[in-house]
Amino acid sequence: MCGIVGYTGPQSAVVPLIEGLRRLEYRGYDSAGIALGTPGTLFIEKRAGKLVNLEESFDESLPVVHSGIGHTRWATHGGPTDRNAHPHVDNEGKLAVIHNGIIENYSALKAELQSRGHTFKSETDTESVAHLLSDLRKEHKGDLTAAMRAAVKLLRGSFTLLAIHADAPDVIVGVRRNSPLVVGLGKGENFMASDVAAFIEYTKRAVELGQDEVVTITPQGILITDLEGKAVAPKEYEISWSAEAAQKGGFTHFMLKEIFEQPKAVADTLIGRLSDNNQIVLDEIRMSSAEIKDLKKILVIACGTAYHAGMIAKYAIEKWAKIPVEVEIASEFRYRDPIINKSTLVIAISQSGETMDTLMAIRHAKSAGARVLAICNTNSSTIPRESDAVLYTHAGPEIAVASTKAFLTQVIAVYLIGLHLAQVRGVMKDSQVAQLYYEMLELPGKIEQILETVEPLRTLTRSFAQSESVLFLGRNIGYPVALEGALKLKELAYMHAEGFAGGELKHGPIALIDKGTPVIAILPSSHEHALDEKMLSNIQEVKARGARVIVIAQESDEVVGAEHIIRIPRASAIFQPILATVPLQVFAYEMAICRGNDVDQPRNLAKSVTVE
Ligand code: M6R
């Protein structure tokens, strides 16, 4: 939550700052603001609402200076107003701070600072840091870096902070605790940001920061120190994502672009995973055969869409590797006493690698003795860094708040893990594993086929735009797909939507069906078990009560009772989620458009949820 960017170098700072904020807006869009390093008193401009409001406020008074900090906000403390927008400044207007996270002890700090004569103008937790830093900087003879180190020792909570002072405007100081911050190394210019997307256009060289590390950037270089002032060697890495990948590339929305990137994302995540002797190659999971054979339980933790990928993991891993799998919402997991030991593998799934609920669950699992394997899409983010091993998905940057391509690649990753474990534990033959892998290689082409034929679905969706709620039904591995379809519709169309296991309907939810209620049913493949018949009965039950039923069914499967049928290509039942999810994404996308909603930045949400 909240996007942060800092720049110092030869450019007019407003250019990289606004460009960076545009690319970070997915992290929050309640307000935006900048502080420019004008000597004497900083130039501050901030506005409630999206970045465009800030840009529209610029006039000829906008100074051309060469350093600054910028912020795009997802509100926690204090509503989304101009006053609560970041940056926040000290009494003299010489020191500005931007913040992502929560300062838990801000009220005590605020009371103390007020008693020392500081005047507060906002309701935010962040403003207390601006005043605190101002006092500490004076105590440390004008050294902003030393002041930041001292301030951090007094703060509780999670935060990324950037600060700038008008007396040395080309120096920007940052720090991170449980919240992301990366440094971009340019030629004669340097950057800091929540995410590499902010500066990818200017440099591919990045430096990751550890917990409680303070970084000072100037145009000439960077210095990283720990809280005692000891220098820390920079851990540099090359950014593999291209600048174009973080742009819309001719699509009207990032979400649509990302839906259409799914064939490639799935193919890239699968590529090179089968050796010549038919072994699934997953060296990254860093487990010996003995450790894999010793596994007694797998626990999957994740949030939102990633949690739905976790549910699919249960079906796949139990089916193939014969290891019991529990799946839990990360925010619930750490408030119980899980039974975990060295024979437990925890799999944490996260697109961003920064989700605080998942991160806290990982720490909880590690403290209980579990080994943690992350499935993540974002290189060098916090979750992979804190896990014992990481399997990266290769979806490329996912900018739209609603997760699409990351989900499909997470599902592919759990399939690969399931097959690998099954193979090492000797419960599946190499030939069976290879056959399933080859079938997976056909999935990108099948997704393409679906995408080539979505136009009628888009038209159909419009006919449901006035509905109050939509219900989704699934059975077996189609159940998480139903949940995912409902989540997408809620977050994008702001409609009441719920996903149910088809068999559970008669235990209560069927009362929701009224004349004309749209119901989307994912029909299990008829080829593997008789579940399709059970779903067809569920369809009759809702139809008898007035529902308008849309069925997602594999080619040539018999469907009775549907008002509309959306056909997807044939695949083994276990792989059906990869195909059945795609029309549901398109349905939610189109519904959002019909209802005039902001597709890429739906209300109240943020892409990266870095608060608990
Ligand atoms: O970055 P993560 O995968 O950890 O994010 C988890 C959820 O916040 C995320 O999947 C969220 O549910 C999406 N907006 C859903 O589209």
Image (cartoon, grey):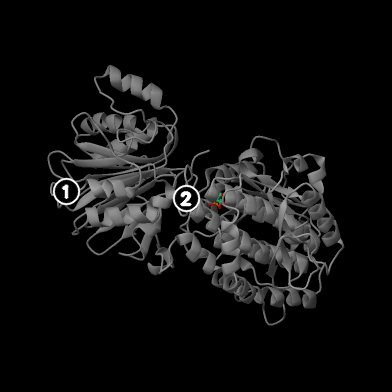
Which SS class for mark 1? loop
For residue 279, which quarter of the picture?
bottom right
In the rendered image, residue 605, in percent from the top left (x then y), is placed at 49, 45
Identify the amino acid type marked 1: Asp
Residue under the image location 74 percent in, 69 percent down: 554
Task: Name the foreground residue: 577 vs 223.
Answer: 577
Task: Name the foreground residue: 546 vs 119.
Answer: 546
**Circle number at residue 59:** 1
Residue under the image location 26 percent in, 53 percent down: 7
* Circle 1 Cα neighbour tier, 10 Å, few/some/many (<14 / 14–19 / ≥20): few
In the rendered image, residue 493, in percent from the top left (x then y), is placed at 54, 49
Q: Is residue 263 left or right of residue 317?
A: left
Q: Is residue 74 left or right of residue 574?
A: left
* Circle 2 Cα neighbour tier, 10 Å, few/some/many (<14 / 14–19 / ≥20): some
Could one spot residue 287 in this view of the protein? no
Residue under the image location 18 percent in, 53 percent down: 66
Which SS class for mark 2? loop
Residue of label 2: 597
Q: CA distance from mark 1 to mark 2?
A: 30 Å
In the rendered image, residue 88, in percent from the top left (x then y), is placed at 28, 35
Identify the amino acid type marked 2: Asn
In the rendered image, residue 72, in percent from the top left (x then y), is placed at 36, 46
Task: Name the foreground residue: 464 vs 225.
Answer: 464
Quarter holding the N terminus is: top left
Task: Give the mark nearest the N terminus, 1 or 2.
Answer: 1
